[in-house]
Image (cartoon, helix red, strand yellow):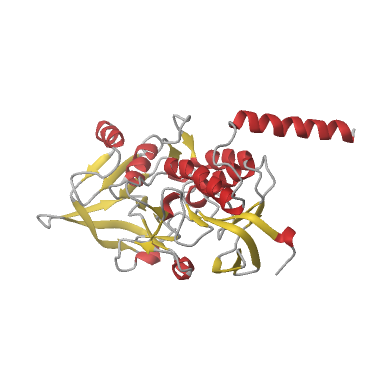
Amino acid sequence: MESEKDVFDITIVGGGPVGMFTAFYAGMRQATVKIIESLPQLGGQLAALYPDKYVYDVAGFPKIKASELVERLYEQMDQFENEVCLNEEVLDVTKENEIFTIKTNSQIHYSKTIIITAGNGAFKPRTMNLENEAKYENKNLYYSIKNMDEFADKDVVIFGGGDSAVDWALMLEKIAARVSIVHRRDRFRAHEHSVKQLKECSVNIVTPYVPAELIGGSKLDCIRLKQAKSKEILELEADAYLVNYGFISDLGPINHWGLAIENNSILVNSRAETNIPGMYAVGDISMYPGKVELMATGFGEAPIAVSNAKVYIDPTESMHVAHSTSIMSRKNNKENQEKVAQS
């Protein structure tokens, strides 16, 4: 094994919003921290798929653009030293003499504890499962939006009935020439307030219809819809089509780490502990009775996992810590003293 200095206190697997906040809180607890992220940037789905989308359910922000939230989280975690490893997928985890050996696609890491914050694991969009669908992908058929301005003054059709579909309909309605939303049911699954806004704005609601056929040449010209009940046919022409059917999650190698997994989630207790001592899970990837899958929930779970990891490493550590104002004040005073000493 490598030298003691290469063994981190806490290694965080997953660099999404919850992973970033976990790194910050671990820094506040004076732990040595490493983040391993499979994507080329931190921020998870917010950065990779929805940078222009507004997030409304983070405490203290009436609304905040996803890309800005990621920037704020980075600024927050960057107050403490941490090592970030991007483009690395964790393939295998073993434990010997109370130290985890973490093997990725490019190197080996060592850690006293692991906190898994990998969201829903690897994700790929659910498609409409129609013939020639792949042919039109990223021409004028999309599964996510990275730049809203590309849809300005265009006729846009959105497929889906959940939060993402309704949120995008409300946002694009402000800049697009026309927005239609197609859902297979009359009732939408999005937050009630968002659905109320949808019904009160100019978005054309097309229910209950399902996509049946794609019509086009070099690009998608029209989608033929079938009425879910009567089988009536309707054709929708548009400049751009957005499919928001969610994502198919895949835990990948995590399935083989010996963790207790149920319904694609890692089972944890009230201390965020998995069935493997020293390994914790928080955020959407974890599950316990009464869990509500929200980013805000993951933010609340992070201090629980970090504090328990600290006690696992050193049983004399306290679960009850000073307020953040006191911790940061001491940190800033120490840094100022060091600057004075160096001058």
Residue 47 seen in the current view: no
Q: Residue furthest left?
A: 230
Of residues 124 and 119, which is closer to you in this image? 119
Quarter placement of the C terminus = top right
- In the rendered image, residue 237, in percent from the top left (x then y), is placed at 29, 51
Residue beneath the point at 43% across and 44% down: 151
Q: Quadrant of residue 173?
A: top left
Please state if 80 lies on the left or on the right of 88 as rendered: right
Residue 38: where, in percent of width, then height?
55, 61
Q: Residue furthest front?
A: 316
On screen, residue 320 versus residue 131, left or right, reads right
At 30% across and 68% down in the image, what residue appears? 131
Residue at left offset 37%, top offset 50%: 239
In the picture, the quarter occupied by the N terminus is: bottom right
Q: Where residue 274 sits in the image (x, y, percent)? A: 45, 58
- Between residue 62 and residue 121, name the one nearer to us: 121
Query: Which percent across, then down, holds residue 181?
Result: 28, 45
Residue lying at the far right of the rendered structure: 343
| Labels in figure, total | 0
Apparent side of residue 216 relative to residue 80 in the rendered image (left or right): left
Which of 216 and 303 lies nearest the eye of the viewer?
A: 303
Q: Quadrant of residue 80?
A: top right
Up-down: is 262 above or below 302? below
Left or right, 79 with reference to 173: right
Query: In terms of depth relative to the viewer, which is nearer, 194 or 177?
Result: 194
